[in-house]
């Protein structure tokens, strides 16, 4: 059998070693394919990050495919069964860095557009692609920058489908209709260093902090809601001491993180943490980093279209989920009321020998095309 268009394009993209924030020509290849279809393609560069905004049409509704061409580093090359940037087929799978996260999705988006436009040249509305090379990195100069620019221009997408690898066991069993927010804190509790034999002349910050940390650990921050589990507070790092066993440390520092739902706000969580620390009379410094707000797309037009497309193509019943880490959907949700993430199984993402089953590649493309048909067919 001749390889499919989607498979061939996926292999082309995997062969480009676009380790974040590099694009290595991936987006230029997309432009070469999209421009003949009538897409107006704009490259937006910010601090070494390459972004692509490609749009066909001017009318509403505006449907956007979103994704990223950057990948995480391959890791130890000797542990890979085949070269990470040499796409390799074996045992019914396609191996290579980005196979699941998310070059197959990008290839499927482009070919889905080709097929849909050929079948519906006079389709209603507009189609766009928002592609970045800064999703796996800091995500400062990527999708967020493009969304700011679109907002300034008054461009308001109606629907956005992000190609993140969301499936758990088989293609289509899970889509994301939201993500939790991420709020981190770096806390330093100050004490007085001294000899451990003379504790009355020192003030042990570990002892002082312990009751407050226990209270923070036991605090019920919210009950969650229909789509989200309760908000979680977790300590990730803690450090104190000079390395000697006879010195009371002068301070203790720790890093913590909230993965929070739409049942809470960043401002509310910050205020409650400060209230607990203040109640325990601690001398402390606390620096906050908000790396993402939660977003949620209620069941509606877009989720129905994607779920129906999955059912028609594969006969799989789909679960809506908000689990997992953050994604670029958090930026798009600021300007788009309906954001859904759907892509390949995620079991091998970021791992050695990342792969996708060959049997899923064309169905993924077909589901993307069917979604366009349900929303934009004339």
Image: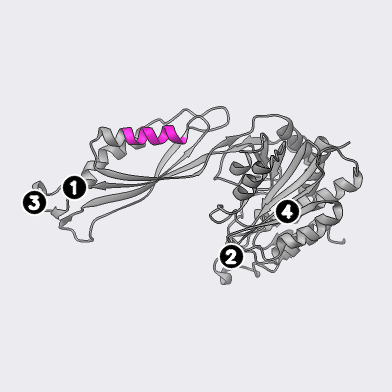
Range covered by the magenta-colored residues: 266-275
| Residue closest to the eye, 229 or 16 | 16
First of labels 4, 2 by sequence position: 2
First of labels 3, 1 by sequence position: 3
Query: Dot 1 corresponds to which residue?
Result: 204
Q: Secondary structure at mark 2?
A: loop
Query: Dot 3 corresponds to which residue?
Result: 198
| Residue closest to the eye, 6 or 91 | 6
Please rate how many residues cluster around mark 2, counting C-alpha atoms within 10 Å: few if below 14, some from 14 to 19, many from 20. many
Res 144 seen here: yes
Vertical arrangement, residue 338 with respect to residue 40, above or below: above
Vertical arrangement, residue 54 with respect to residue 77, above or below: above
Query: Dot 4 corresponds to which residue?
Result: 106
Estimate the x, y position of residue 129 in percent, counting from the top left.
73, 49
Query: Dot 2 corresponds to which residue?
Result: 74
Q: CA distance from mark 3 to mark 1?
A: 11 Å
Q: CA distance from mark 3 to mark 4?
A: 64 Å
């Amino acid at each position: 059998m001749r390889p499919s268009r989607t498979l061939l394009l996926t292999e082309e993209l995997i062969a480009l070693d676009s380790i974040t924030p590099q694009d290595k020509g991936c987006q230029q290849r997309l432009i070469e394919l999209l421009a003949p279809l009538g897409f107006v393609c704009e490259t937006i560069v910010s601090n070494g990050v390459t972004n692509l905004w490609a749009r066909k049409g001017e009318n509403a509704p505006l449907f956007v495919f979103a994704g990223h061409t950057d990948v995480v580093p391959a890791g130890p090359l000797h542990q890979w069964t085949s070269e990470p940037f040499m796409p390799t087929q074996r045992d019914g799978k396609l191996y290579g860095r980005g196979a699941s996260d998310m070059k197959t999705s990008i290839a499927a988006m482009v070919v889905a557009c080709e097929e849909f436009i050929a079948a519906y040249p006079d389709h209603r509305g507009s189609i766009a692609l928002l592609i970045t090379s800064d999703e796996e990195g800091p995500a400062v100069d990527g999708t967020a920058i493009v969304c700011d620019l679109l907002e300034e221009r008054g461009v308001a997408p109606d629907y956005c489908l992000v190609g993140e690898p969301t499936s758990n066991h088989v293609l289509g069993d899970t889509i994301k209709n939201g993500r939790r927010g991420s709020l981190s804190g770096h806390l330093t509790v100050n004490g007085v260093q001294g000899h451990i034999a003379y504790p009355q002349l020192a003030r042990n910050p570990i002892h002082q902090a312990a009751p407050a940390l226990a209270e923070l650990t036991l605090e019920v921050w919210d009950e969650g809601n229909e789509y989200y589990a309760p908000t979680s507070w977790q300590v990730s790092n803690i450090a104190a001491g000079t390395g000697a066993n006879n010195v009371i440390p002068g301070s203790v520092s720790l890093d913590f993180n909230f993965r929070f739902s739409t049942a809470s706000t960043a401002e509310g969580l910050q205020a409650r943490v400060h209230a607990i620390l203040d109640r325990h009379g601690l001398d402390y410094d606390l620096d906050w980093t908000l790396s993402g707000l939660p977003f949620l797309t209620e069941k509606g037009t877009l989720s129905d279209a994607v779920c129906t497309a999955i059912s028609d193509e594969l006969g799989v019943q789909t679960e809506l989920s908000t689990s997992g880490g953050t994604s670029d959907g958090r930026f798009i949700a600021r300007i788009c009321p309906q954001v859904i993430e759907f892509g390949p199984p995620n079991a091998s993402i970021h791992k050695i020998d990342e792969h996708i089953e060959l049997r899923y590649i064309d169905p993924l493309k077909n589901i993307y095309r069917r979604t366009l048909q349900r929303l934009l067919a004339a």
